[in-house]
Amino acid sequence: MPFDALLKPIRIGRMELANRIAMAPMTVDYGNDDETPSERQIAYYSERAKWKPGLISLEVCSVDPEHRYQLHSLGLHSDFQIDGHRKLVDSIHAHGVKVQPQISHPGPESIAPFVRQIQPLGPSVIRTETTQQACREMTMEDIERVIEMYGDGALRAREAGYDGIELHAAHSYMMLGSFLSPLRNFRTDVYAGKKFEGRAKFMLDVLANIRSKVGEAFPITVRISGFERQPGGREIDDSQRLAPLLVDAGVDCFHVSGGVGDGNITQIITGPDYQPGYNLSSARSIRQVVDVPVMVVGQNMDPNFAERMVQEGEADIVAMGRAFLADPELPRKIRDDQTDEIIPCTLCQGCVDIMQTEFNGAGCVVNPRAGKEREYPIEPASEAKKVVVVGGGPGGLASAIYAAERGHSVTLFEREKQLGGRFRFASTVFPGNQKHLDWLLKTIERLGVEVCTEQEVDRAALEQLRPDAVILAAGGRYEWPELEGDALPHVVTGLSVMDLLDQLCDQAANETPLSLDVGEKVVVIGGNLIGVELSEHLGRLGKRVSLLETGRRFAMPAGKKRRGDHASRLDAAGVSVNTGVEVKGILPEGVVIAGSTPDDRIIEADTVIVVGQPVADPAWVERFEGAAQQIYSVGDLGGFGLSLKSVRDAIEVAYSI
Ligand SMILES: Cc1cc2nc3c(=O)[nH]c(=O)nc-3n(C[C@H](O)[C@H](O)[C@H](O)COP(=O)(O)O)c2cc1C
Ligand code: SF4
């Protein structure tokens, strides 16, 4: 079997896992107001358990009733919560899968200031990046109380039927991670941060309390940052010294993560700037000093890579987080050697941005079913229909897939030679998008969608086809700002920008030379996502790019985390970014802007690119009114959005047919 090592059973203490694929803890924020698991959450986890990973490590469960981690995260701090957890556990056990909650005290990361108007607790006074709040230093009484809470929380976990617990001590955050790290523990008492013994003591006290309550046999995993990747933080030798002590204190498994928590959690939930398996060397180092299993997390999404890690004895269990948001069926596809069917996580950071901007829990850009398992079950529609999709961008491709999955017969028309639409450029710039596009293309083929390229469909042609439903996904109408001087020969504006994007795709794919002349000094006017990605790309090609945006923020409508990634990429590509800029016009030598000083300034340019964006095109949709019983439009045709909007529209429409 190709994934022999990954599919081999293993034990964590007395807990027997059927394979070595673990779902990493992810706070999806679907919980009830009282921090018990909601029906939505149960459906989300059951769907992941159904495909039988060896283990599900559940998200953060707070042990303190006064301190929750997120508005709708989970708790195991009160007895009334046990029944709700038991229901969740039963739904996972129904599929024969082991599950453990992540026992945690949010510590400095508590959102108590917002929901209870009380200060978070921590080893020392620290201002937390994520909440921008300061915690207070715990007294000895606080410490004793919190230690008891950990033990009680673990006991409730056992009573709810969990197979073990994962104790969260990673990332130099929350309570255990903060006590453990010299970056956050400035105490001078027995828990003193400067001394290894002092930093380790809180953890050992917590473990002793847990063991005294749950007994010797209940499996305990500890999640730890092998290496904090921060000047002054814990290094791997510290973890190597700590790990055997923790085993002596009753730890049955290590779950090795890395880094510290910053405002954008960049080292925990990473973008493509990190390498696959970026925590593996730490895991290997810890594995060298203990005899219990070591699990590793962090961009282990490629099953072949994961297999190799286990096969070569670098880690015992491979934890994957986002891969399970993107595709719950991942373990089944590994087992059946159908890995090319796995919906790939693109590392786009959308899951976090969705949570932070929509306040309705995590979602996934490549899998709009994540968190909506009850709304969109994969099952046939009551009646199979004939569906025509017009447009082969991500919205059209996704519509075709979801409709075909439901048993409809689908034909897709695209006026260009190639499928992908504007997403082709996004794929040239960001490799994750290319993976998504490849998956979309492979999947329409696998599902037998009939694809007609280089075919424009008008109303008459559509009526002849006599479809039951039509999904219009032709993209919006492209609009751009008009500026003084934009007719000058060195200005690329209007639809020529789209042409330029296409040419850049061809250049990247086939080294086809550009017919549009782009000079060395480029000014891009318009910092929406198109402008940002274009600037990144041109910067990487060696151009000296200045990006000008009139609004205060660039890369809109992306969320904070993805914007953070773009900021790093623009920086790495040498692009200078100016926001809040008034562009007054274009001259042969450059772009005139009103700066913060009284005088106008000129930013020199050999080439100026004026970027617009798609807007809703109701007139285009009206042309097809009445051409079929059901007509829908998806994606940019209804207004500019990310591919997230397209795939969400697509699944909603596919389930309306
Ligand atoms: C939406 C989301 C929520 C997360 N919540 C938690 C959490 O509650 N506890 C934790 O230790 N890690 C959490 N993580 C981090 C993951 O467990 C994992 O370490 C990280 O995503 C890197 O693994 P991956 O590259 O396989 O996604 C979260 C990650 C995501 C994407
Ligand atoms: S939203 Fe993006 S980063 Fe998050 S799981 Fe989905 S594909 Fe991966």
Image (cartoon, rainbow, N blue to C red):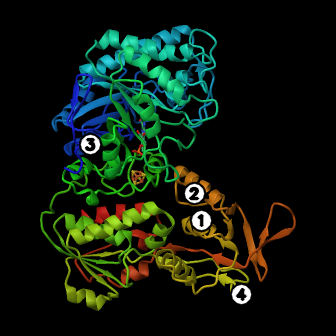
Element under disc 2: helix
Work out whether 153 lies above or below 407. above
Q: Are marks 1 and 4 in contact (CB under 8 Å)?
A: no
Q: CA distance from mark 1 to mark 4?
A: 24 Å
Q: Label 1: how many residues lie within 10 Å, few (<14), some (14-19) or many (20+)?
A: many
Work out whether 481 lies above or below 645. below
Quadrant of residue 604 within the rendered picture: bottom right
User: Label 3 amino acid?
Assistant: Leu
Report which residue position mark 2 lands on. 566
Question: Residue 99, how many percent across, how many down?
Answer: 26, 32
> Mark 3 vs mark 1: which is more N-terminal?
3
User: Label 2 amino acid?
Assistant: His
Report which residue position mark 4 lands on. 488
* Residue sitting at x 15%, y 63%: 381
Q: Quadrant of the C terminus?
A: bottom left
Q: Are marks 2 and 1 in contact (CB under 8 Å)?
A: yes
